[in-house]
Amino acid sequence: MTRNKLSTIIAGLLLTTGAGGAGLAVAKDHGDMSFQRVSTLANYLNNGEAIDQETVSEIVAATRDGMTVVYTDSPLEQIGFVDITDPAMPQPAGTLALNGEPTSVDVVTVGQGRDKKEYALVAVNTSADYVNVSGELVVVDIASQAVAATLDLGGQPDSIKVSPDGRYVAIAIENERDEDIEVNDIEGGLPQFPAGYLAIVDIVGDSPADWSRRDVDLSGLAAYGGDDPEPEFVDVNRDNLAAVSLQENNHLAIVDLKSGEVRSHFDLGTVDLEGVDAHEDDIISLGDDLAAVPREPDAIAWLKGKQGEWVIATANEGDLFGGSRGFSIFTQNGDLLFDSGSSFEEIAVRHGHYPESRSENKGSEPEAIEQGTFGDDDYLFVGSERGSFVAVYRMEAGEPEFSQLLPAPFGPEGVLAIPQRNLLIASGEEDDPSFGVRSSIMVYELKKGAPAYSQIVSADVDGKPIGWSALSGMTAVPGEKNSLLAVWDSYYSESRIFSIDTSAQPALITGATTISGGTGNYDPEGIAIAPDGSRWVASEGNASDSRPNRLLHLDENGAVLSEIGLPQEILDCRAASGETGTLGSGFEGVAVVPGNDGDYSLLVAQQRGWDYTTAACDALDDDAGGLNANGQPNRTRLWTYDPQSGDWGHIAWELAALPENASWVGLSEVTRAPDGSLVVIERDNRTGDFAQLKTLVRVEPSALEDGIVTADEKQVYNLLPAMQESRGWISDKPEGVAITENGKAFVVTDNDGVDDWSGETSFLELGPFKKLFR
């Protein structure tokens, strides 16, 4: 790049448009109550040095005082203990190895006075295969974390529940089917023997050795697969009635635990769904209808109806034939009182948690359901396995009314209410060793004040929420103090630009514009607005250049005016060096630098440095600053582009030191602040406990004069404290930053399209930009 071109860009950066702005936005206290996440504990912390092992928390239970949580960990064939005496600082409290795979756990107290003991009752699958089934009830003394007794269950257990009075243990013996066997031309179909049943353990006396088991035959009840009932989940009410879901049979049975008699049973029917996404086409579109979808519930929960009668809520996960993408409430005789229809899917879409990759299957897949009475209020909690959230409903006159969405662990399997402590627990069954997104237990507390999550949601258009997710780049709209634009990335097949109103609480996505025309195959990672109102989008390429790095020039309606690729000499060197030499990273953000008389230049952030292996290309790559411990350049670059002349150039960028455990450090965004300075997101690629570098970096225009930005020319704002305020497992990807003309700074994280990530999006209002770097 010539000296004159660089001087023009620097002069443009010095043109200011004024600064200022209000302070950090705080959620208003509406005098109401909401659940707030107060802590997250990764399960691997309970396993000593074994960080590389897969470890999960599936089903959770708590002691009577609510101070200790017990969870099942099937991959390691163990249970784990967590001390939540201080819910904001949960502590790993040990594990206990088992002789098989734990499937569920509950807690019971027996004895009186000094002889009183609390036991964790663990259902353990010890089966050799689908035909040779076996299982046991392992009774664990919680105080000593030692096995007190083992009872044979006769088959493969799934769910377990202790009656509220502590007299009975109900265990769903599923004897699960082999999904790869074809029965009557149905893959995984029924019957597949041995049949399942309900086991009842009578708690008689203070010694578990004195307890005995009775079995309840559930065959002959369901219309489909009646000879092979598949009990999945059980819940027990205060009248000692057990409700048992027969998931693949699409049936429910109610059993009197005292007598062992089936009081009633009924088919759970089907649902007609209107306005869902039933096609896995990498675009969120709520335009499909599904007819007669069987509910096939997993978890179920007793709750009180309008007249104080016991009714049953079902989380309709689906399995063999169905999955109605919501939840229902039935009377004990099978009369339908409520069905959520398409609303559960709409909630997922509105909050950015919709898993589009599951559209052809069961969508958000509600799997967990829990009832809890907190003070005078009854709540119903519905956990989405694929969307990784818990939807909170207040029960109003027997009807569930959506209250808030809670971000949950990756793949929430268990949801547990602890009303006596105003707490809610969610546990996650997905784990990505060793430095990935780890399985965790999250603790929420019912507190006064508005919900802290979500920080951004979408508005409705024609009665349906705007589909959004994977926000990857952002910019402020000139002349509008509360308006931003954002793009989503190539996780989706159709590139879109979103309008955001930051004056709303939470911030509101008010519109979506599709990028039209051009050659397609885009990966939008940054967006900026030119002085003439046109848009520039940075589209990231891949290592092979089958998707090239491009600048897209768009009109205000999203139509492509032109596509600008890298200089041919750069493309030739990338091709000669191959995918390894170029590291596969590319355009990650774009900023407009105004000039004179309406002219302007562009700055484009490149994520990581390129190190060409071809000697003739050495002068064109980024290794002049040497290589880090992982063999990657210590520098990357800010590309410069002059739309008037078509000239490319670059400014070298010295990257921050590589943190421990990180694979790389790179840039994710560049924008121009109102005072003329540049602001860049510089980060590592780690999540949660392993994240060390999430920063905003400010540089003065003068830092660009010598063609390189060095470490001592950077002002650094640490984003980690703001990200950690969520008390969750934090994202690796702050990807978008925008600074409005009145000086407010906003940062958004990319949720990866709810794929290999929980779907949680942080939309951070950091307050006045001018105060961040003091």
Image (cartoon, grey):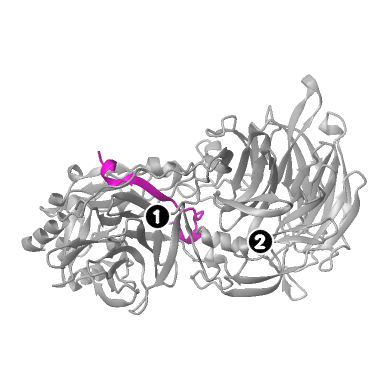
Badge 1 or badge 2: first in the primary sequence = 2
Residue 133, position in %: x, y? 78, 53
Image: magenta residue range: 751-774
761 part of magenta stretch: yes
Residue annotated with mark 2: 326
Q: Quadrant of residue 441?
A: top right
Badges 1 and 2: C-beta atoms under 8 Å apart? no
- Answer left or right for 670 relative to 138: left
Q: Residue at x 83, y 59 (%)?
A: 195
Residue 717, position in %: x, y? 29, 43
- Looking at the rendered structure, the kind of residue marked 1 is Thr
Viewer-proximal residue, 201 or 149?
201
Viewer-proximal residue, 681 or 120?
681
Secondary structure under the numbered disc 1 in the rendered image: loop
Viewer-proximal residue, 332 or 206?
332
Query: Which disc, if any, is residue 607?
Result: none
Q: Is residue 100 positioned above or below 636 on the image?
A: above
> Is there any visible trace of residue 431 in the rendered image?
yes
Query: Which disc, if any, is residue 502?
Result: 1
> Is there any visible trace of residue 755 in the rendered image?
no
Secondary structure under the numbered disc 2 in the rendered image: loop
